[in-house]
Amino acid sequence: MTPTTQKSLVIVGATGMVGGYALRYALGHSAVKSVTAIVRRKLAISHPKLNEVIHQDFANCSALAKPLADQDAAVFCLGAYTGAVSDEELRSITVDYTIEFAAVLHRSSPRAAFSFLSGRGADPTGRSRTSFARYKGQAENALLAAGFPWVYIFRPAYIYPVDPRREPNFGYRLLRAIYPVFRVPFPNLVIRADELSQAMVNVAISKTEEHESRIFENHDIRGMVDSLHRSSG
């Protein structure tokens, strides 16, 4: 899919790992006219395409109605690690914030495409004993029912940070350490953060003529990345 006109893109979670890569990639993309970054704290970046909107309370996004008007696409990367917050906070961030933002965006830009960062194992049936899987599944269901013409749900497995960072727990420290070896026999269980973000931006700004809802598992995302590398190579 190749975009034919420049698009206006909104990114939520631009201070996070995947959202940060999405922001930098979008700012350098020739098919992107403008990027509206909805953030809680000021970004350490400036760019002619960038419109930075500070917003603290994602439980109430009504104040975002004006900056979300006339947007062609959204890339939503807001989230929290399991164990880093309480279960109640995890549900609020994963489900409630997503639903609230999507509702305001749809009222302001009903023809926008929506790329959502979910996760491997997301369970839309609500039967999973894992909170993360249940809540991501609930958020997916809400987005698919929100009325957007195009909804793209990304379910990556382990996201490799690429740049050094403070890992949130021991499991992530271990996965980062073994990634160079682990990715060879298990390529469909890992994805680089920068490549994931590129896929999320590309599919959002390259929406098809026909309305569609797509769920991309880790192997699908890798296929999109490989296709991008072939076309740019």
Image (cartoon, grey):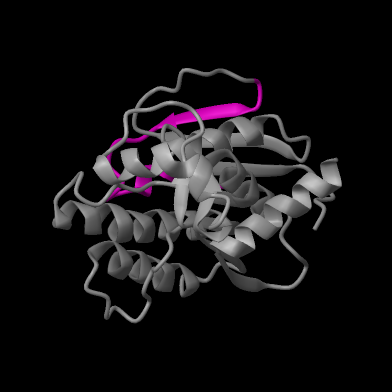
* Nearer the observer, 47 or 105: 47
* Nearer the observer, 103 or 175: 175
Q: Position of residue 220 (x, y in %)?
A: 63, 64
Number of numbered discs on residues = 0
Q: Residue at x 40, y 22 (%)?
A: 42
Q: Position of residue 227 (x, y in %)?
A: 77, 54
Q: Position of residue 224 (x, y in %)?
A: 69, 56
Q: Quadrant of residue 178?
A: top left
- Magenta highlight range: 48-70
Q: Is residue 231 visible?
A: yes
Q: Position of residue 29 (x, y in %)?
A: 73, 35
Q: Residue at x 49, y 28 (%)?
A: 163
Q: Is residue 65 visible?
A: no
Q: Quadrant of the N terminus?
A: bottom right
* Nearer the observer, 65 or 87: 87
Q: Quadrant of the C terminus?
A: top right
Q: Residue at x 29, y 49 (%)?
A: 60
Q: Is residue 223 above or below residue 57?
A: below
Q: Is residue 141 above or below residue 176?
A: below
Taking the image as shown, residue 138 lies to the left or right of residue 110, namely left
* Nearer the observer, 109 or 25: 25
Most frequent secondary structure within the magenta stretch: loop
Q: Is residue 54 above or below residue 2?
A: above
Residue 187 lies in the magenta stretch: no
Q: Residue at x 46, y 35 (%)?
A: 14
